[in-house]
Image (cartoon, grey):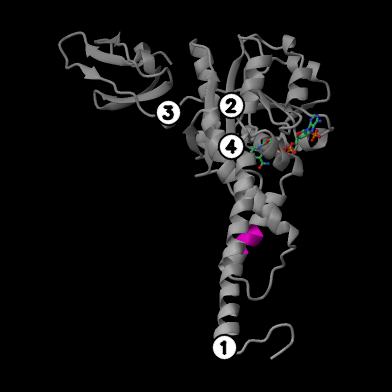
Amino acid sequence: MLLSRVLPSNITLLPTFSNARAAPLRYRHVLAGGAITVPVRRRFAMTIQAREGSPVIDIKPQPLKLLDRRTKLKIAVIGFGNFGQFLARTFAAQGHEILAYSRTDYSDTARSLGVAFFDDQHDLCEQQPDVVLLSTSILSAEAVLRSLPIQRLRRSTLFVDVLSVKEFPRNLFLQLLPPDFDILCTHPMFGPESGKHGWAGLPFAYDKVRIGDSDDRVERCRAFLEIFDREGCRMVEMSCAEHDETAAEIQFLTHTIGRVLAKLDLKSTPINTKGYETLLNLVQNTCSDSYELYNGLFIYNKNSTELIEKLDGALDTTKKELFERLHGIFRKQLFEGSARISVGGGN
Ligand code: NAP
């Protein structure tokens, strides 16, 4: 909708320069007792001024969330496994057109989700999607990306990844994609288990690694991010390096503890405490993800090696503290005879 078309004839628009980063926004203003809502871009922030002496009104930019307009995207999901399907369900429910490709034939599942499944990457790329979303395992990402016939895509296609590590796909995209392609690296910090009741309040980390200046490219990136914003995700913009540093602690540590506990084969009992229930849930949450995912978190995040060493050291220190105390008690009893103690069947 053109702003000038909805304004009274005595009102004129004066574009004013703004230093804010370009992002489409909704501006709401009351004119002559009625409300109008108009989408304009932040960098063209408007001053509304009456031609015949009415007061000057400045329209201030509003946050991204207030956007009213909905851009429908054609999104190609590459890697239609556990997580790719989980995302596609919500993308489709929001009215976006979803295409998918995977090495496994998921055509039945795709049909049930309203997704067009392609068993040939060339056919998929010839559909010229707006967005190509890489959702393969971390370990296979490079091989999959190298095998994509990107020459069949439009030159300005937006590439997005959802890998649980970020520096690795960022470098891969920068290295393998021609400079015309846009790049957005993201990590929805939830999965089919933790996000099964909705995405509200769950963190979504992203880094706009390379987004062209033109309005349509900025708008496409915004429209993609808005999918998650609309579901109520907590949108966190951070660099890929910053993500990996933080994620090693919060994600790799969580998965490692979950997998260590799984080796203990913990069982639910009639006297479960809340804490123990938390441990059982952790095992369930982490072990429902593939081992390949966990392995990728270790191999492709350089911060994970240091973290697992620290964890090992912390377990050793804790054991040492416990046994030193125990030895202290034994020694006291042996040499000072303060109490009798039963060791190895004696009295
Ligand atoms: P995953 O085991 O990490 O990846 C499975 C996907 O990778 C499937 O689509 C699979 O395709 C594909 N794949 C594996 N090896 C392949 C190969 N050699 N060649 C081609 N494709 C291959 O499990 P996931 O949970 O679906 O995760 C997908 C991505 O999302 C990962 O990068 C993960 O880090 C990220 N992620 C996952 C979660 C989560 O909670 N699960 C959350 C955030 C981000 P086929 O099924 O066709 O074999």
| Ligand 1 lies in quarter | top right
Mostly what secondary structure, the magenta segment?
helix
- Residue 322, picture quadrant: bottom right
Asked if 276 appears above or below 251 in the picture, the reply is below
Marks 2 and 3 sit apart, C-alpha to C-alpha, by 19 Å
Circles 3 and 4: CB atoms closer than 8 Å: no
Where is 234 relative to 70, above or below?
below
Viewer-nearest of discs 3 and 1: 1
Q: Residues within 10 Å of mark 2 (few under 14, many from 20)?
A: many
Question: Total of numbered circles in the picture?
Answer: 4
Kindly report which numbered mark, 2 or 3, lies closer to the viewer in this rendering: 2
The residue that disc 3 covers is 64
Secondary-structure class at tag 2: strand
Of pointers 3 and 4, the one earlier in the residue sequence: 3
Residue under the image location 69 percent in, 83 percent down: 343
Residue labelled with disc 4: 188
- Tell me, yes or no, whether the highlighted magenta stretch contains residue 109: no
User: Which of 339 and 11 lies nearest the eye of the viewer?
Assistant: 339
* Earlier-in-chain disc, 2 versus 3: 3
- The secondary structure type at the circle numbered 4 is strand
Residue type at mark 1? Gly
Pointer 2 residue: 185
Q: Which residue is mark 1?
A: 337
